[in-house]
Image: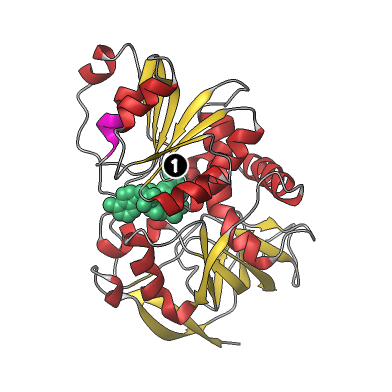
Amino acid sequence: MNTSVQTVRIHRTGGPDVLQMDTLELGPPQAGEVQVEHKAIGLNFIEVYWRTGLYPLPLPSSLGTEAAGVITAVGPGVTGFQVGDRVAYASGPVGAYSTRRNMPAQPLVKLPDGIGFDTAAAIMLKGLTAQYLLRRVYPVKAGDTILFHAAAGGVGLLACQWAKALGARVIGTVSTRAKAELALANGCDEVIVTSEDNTVERVKALTSGKGVPVVYDSVGKDTFVTSLDCLKPRGMMVSFGNASGAVDPVPLGWLAQRGSLVLTRPTLASFTADSAELQESADELFDVVMRGVVKVHINQRMPLADVGRAHELLTSRQTTGCTVLLP
Ligand code: NDP
């Protein structure tokens, strides 16, 4: 039997005004799929890249990557999930901006009782990203000094708390003093306010001229070279996003000139494609959240129908922490 669902789609790329609420008929889940009724939906920067066309999608297209909800139907061949399960996901086909959807079962993770739907929608994508960045791309060790850009943002607030709990000394960057206060209260030992300070000079001053062994940079175009200049020889540049625009092509010589730097451009999807790895990462994430080691700041909550406003706030740097959309 078909069900009417509300889905935010784009029919063309552009500003937040291209986000349009459409009513569609949803059939039963196909083989390997489950149907999920969403209770909370996460807002993420990747949806801006899709909306603007930086990451192309065939149009018209649904949007959305991260949500939490309840399984309402199970398609043929699905094992391990049943109707009524509380679940969340952070990858798979786009389509999280909807009241209900069908999707492959693989990206789903069952929620422990201690994790509510809002929290799950806030942390699945951003928290799993923090997990793979800090634990697997460059495993942060006690005593490391690390640089994390956009420290008061969604990924940033989660990651800086987690890095601190791993024993690191965390230097964060933010654009305003208000964001600096938030970052200092959530894992950062030092905060560089980019509108006032010279990032390279401050990092050098804070590390006795040595530089840091790792920079986590999701700002992209505006900060890429600065980040390389903050690294010590053989340090690792983790370029994991483009909030300010895509990074220009990088001459390999830049890595040599700065002392055998390592450059990586990782994606969450490649760190969660394997179900066992996904479950292991999610278990670790849920554990640090349920123990209160990492606190979840849902600083913006709004109806799914206001997703255009949510995009405006995110791209104009007015959000902090996580944003959750309510279907
Ligand atoms: P955030 O909440 O961190 O928002 C982005 C932040 O980037 C802003 O708040 C702002 O902080 C900073 N920023 C700097 N320059 C700009 C600019 N020109 N326009 C907008 N923001 C800017 O977003 P998310 O937590 O959703 O994502 C953070 C980043 O991580 C994004 O780049 C995203 O693409 C990336 N990401 C990558 C993943 C991966 O696996 N590769 C997975 C998840 C996220 P401030 O004002 O303090 O500078």
The structure residue drawn at horizontal position 31% and vertical position 25%, both measured from the top left corner, is 201
**In this orientation, which residue lies closer to the viewer: 180 or 44?**
180
Q: Which residues are magenta?
A: 223-227
**In this orientation, which residue lies closer to the viewer: 88 or 158?**
158
Image quadrant holding the C terminus, namely: bottom right
Specify whether tag 1 is near ligand 1 (CB below 8 Å).
yes
Residue 273 at least partly seen: no
Q: Along the horizontal axis of the image, is 86 left or right of 46?
A: right
Q: Please identify the quarter of the rendering in which residue 256 is found.
A: top left
Residue 53 at least partly seen: yes
Q: Does 226 lie within the magenta span?
A: yes
Image quadrant holding the N terminus, namely: bottom right
The residue pinned by badge 1 equals 267
**In this orientation, which residue lies closer to the viewer: 248 or 105?**
248
Magenta stretch: dominant secondary structure: helix
Give above or below for 212 relative to 164: above
**Residue closest to the far right:** 113
